[in-house]
Image (cartoon, helix red, strand yellow):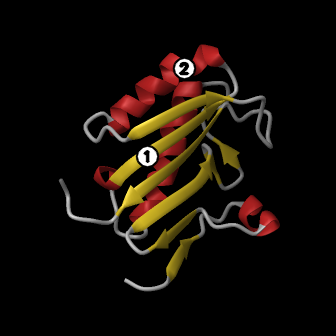
């Protein structure tokens, strides 16, 4: 495959800041910081497990538009606003990616652009032969 393809999710921040939800370049697909927003609605307000579950689902929808599924995910990055939420967010991650076991980083940050956001997820996927 030659060239680069981009996926837009319709987030108002994509237009305002000039970015794509996901970018495919060759066999690699990267998904930028994804939250539990769908349009103007934040799902799981106050619930880190639900926000993580929805955010990961949103990221998977983006790679799905490029024909990839969870089995293609090789890396996840999870950003949290509170260390107390590690177990709940980890539980959501295991439910979605437990059989895939991507390389994962989880870090606590001081906050996001909307203070109701508790979790943001990034992922990388590889379009190649399954192992």
| Rendered-image quadrant of the N terminus | bottom left
Q: Look at 60% across and 43% down and name the residue there.
A: 36
**Foreground residue among 123 and 39:** 123
What residue do we see at 75% from left, 61% from top?
12
Residue matched to label 1: 75
Q: Nearer the viewer, residue 83 or 113?
A: 83
Tally the marks: 2
Residue 72 % position (x, y): 32, 55
Q: Which residue is located at x 45 percent, y 36 percent?
A: 104
SS label for mark 2? helix
Q: Are marks 1 and 2 in contact (CB under 8 Å)?
A: no
Q: Is residue 105 left or right of residue 129?
A: right
Left or right: 27 in relation to 9: left
Label 2 crowd bin: few (<14), some (14–19), many (20+), radius 10 Å: some
Q: Give the farthest residue toward the left.
A: 131
The image shows residue 130, relative to residue 37, as above or below, that is below
Circle 1 Cα neighbour tier, 10 Å, few/some/many (<14 / 14–19 / ≥20)? some
Residue 91, percent from left and from top: 42, 24
- From this view, report whether residue 1 is shown above or below residue 124: below
Element marked by disc 1: strand
Kindly identify which numbered label has been placed on residue 67: none
Mark with earlier residue (1, 2) = 1
Residue found farthest to the top: 84
Spatial CA span between label 1 and label 2: 18 Å
2 left or right, relative to 30: left
Name the spot of residue 25 as percent of width and height, x first. 47, 73
Q: Which dot marks residue 86?
A: 2
Q: Residue at point 48% right, 71% down?
A: 24
Q: Nearer the viewer, mark 1 or mark 2?
A: 1
């Amino acid at each position: 495959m030659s060239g680069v393809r981009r996926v837009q999710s319709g987030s108002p921040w994509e237009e305002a800041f000039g970015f794509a939800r996901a970018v495919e370049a060759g066999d690699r697909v990267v998904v930028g910081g994804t939250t539990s927003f769908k349009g103007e609605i934040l799902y799981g307000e106050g619930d880190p497990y639900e926000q993580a579950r929805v955010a990961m689902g949103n990221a998977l929808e983006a790679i799905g538009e490029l024909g990839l599924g969870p089995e293609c995910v090789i890396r996840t990055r999870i950003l949290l606003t509170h260390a107390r939420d590690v177990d709940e967010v980890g539980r959501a991650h295991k439910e979605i990616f437990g059989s895939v076991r991507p390389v994962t980083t989880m870090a606590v940050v001081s906050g996001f652009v909307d203070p109701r956001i508790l979790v943001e997820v990034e992922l990388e996927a590889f379009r190649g032969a399954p192992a």
